[in-house]
Amino acid sequence: MHPYSELLFQSSLITVRWYGFLIALGVLLAYYFSLREVRLLKISESKFDSVFLLTLFFGIVGARIGFVVQNTTYFSSHIIEMFRIWDGGLSIHGALILGAITLFVSARNLKINIIKVANVIAPNVMLAAAIGRWGNFFNQEIVGKPTDSALKLFIDPAKRPVGFEDVANYHPVFLYESILLLIGFIIFRIFKNRLEGFALAYTLIIYSSIRIIIEFWRIDYKPILIGLDLAQIVSCGIIVITLVFYFAGKRSLTSSAA
């Protein structure tokens, strides 16, 4: 059997799942690191808190919407389950898209520098995601392809993908992504002074690159165009758009200075 339960704690009054606990832990650490930067940059803490909470809330909403969109066949027959977020099922791309829109709108309405706030928050999202991915371990979801390698993840029979009921061990893709995200976060912290103005772009490019690589190991990998699946195509689009906006912004600043 899977050695760990999905439940961290349960009583007659409250149920705490590993999935929710780890996401909350990741968010708190991201907030902690972000708040340190906010104080150094002398950004209003109350305004930052408002932006952070709004971005977090709508980022989670976007993550769920993204997951539902990617699994429309299933949810069209299980409509109520769309709202059972505690059972797992979030899309990072959905979180990035709706979270970014919320960040832009809320920061603009509160009249604080959007780029500064985005550069503060973005790298810490990698840490939050690296921790949150362990929720997939406890839920036994985001399964990789079958493997007999030394590094493998045992999946309970009840959780195994359809058509693979007799296969016990799979690539631990949650672990691959978690480690790579943590490395990306550590590299940023080491070279923070050099990457400070590039923090948002760095995060988007690193995460998207990791997702492109990881998809090849996922059991639900279904290429639809030039050997890439939907998540990889979206990731490629994010990288291209990020680079275009970053270099366009640099050119604009250079022209203004001249």
Image (spheres, helix red, strand yellow):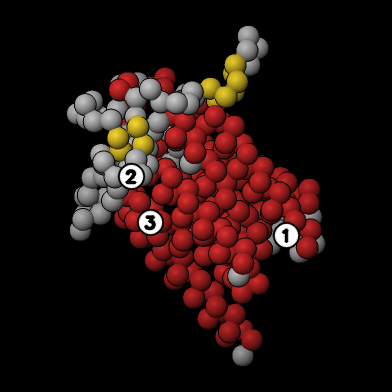
Side of 180 relative to 126 (left or right): left
Instruction: Mark 2 vs mark 1: give the one in front.
Output: 2
Q: Is residue 208 above or below residue 168?
A: below
Q: Position of residue 246 (x, y in %)?
A: 51, 71
Residue type at mark 3 is: Ser
**Which residue in the protein does label 3 denote?**
235
Within-10-Å neighbours for mark 3: few <14, some 14–19, many 20+: many
Quarter that holds the N terminus: top left
Disc 1 target residue: 37
Helix, strand or loop at label 3? It is helix
Q: Earlier in the sequence, mark 2 or mark 3?
A: 2
Amino acid type, callout 1:
Glu
Give how far across and how far down residue 9 sits, in percent.
60, 20
Query: Vertical placement of 127 versus 171: above or below?
Result: below
State the residue position of label 2. Answer: 150
Tag 2: amino acid: Ala
Q: Is residue 43 left or right of residue 247?
A: right
Name the disc covering residue 160, or none: none
Q: Of the residues under marks 1 and 3, which one precedes in the sequence?
A: 1
Q: Nearer the viewer, mark 2 or mark 3?
A: 2
In the displayed structure, 159 sits above or below 113; it is: above
Question: Tag 1's secondary structure?
Answer: helix
Residue 64 shows up from this direction: no
Quadrant containing the C terminus in the rendered view:
bottom right
Q: Residue at x 48, y 41 (%)?
A: 133
Proximity of marks 2 and 3: CB atoms separated by less than 8 Å: no
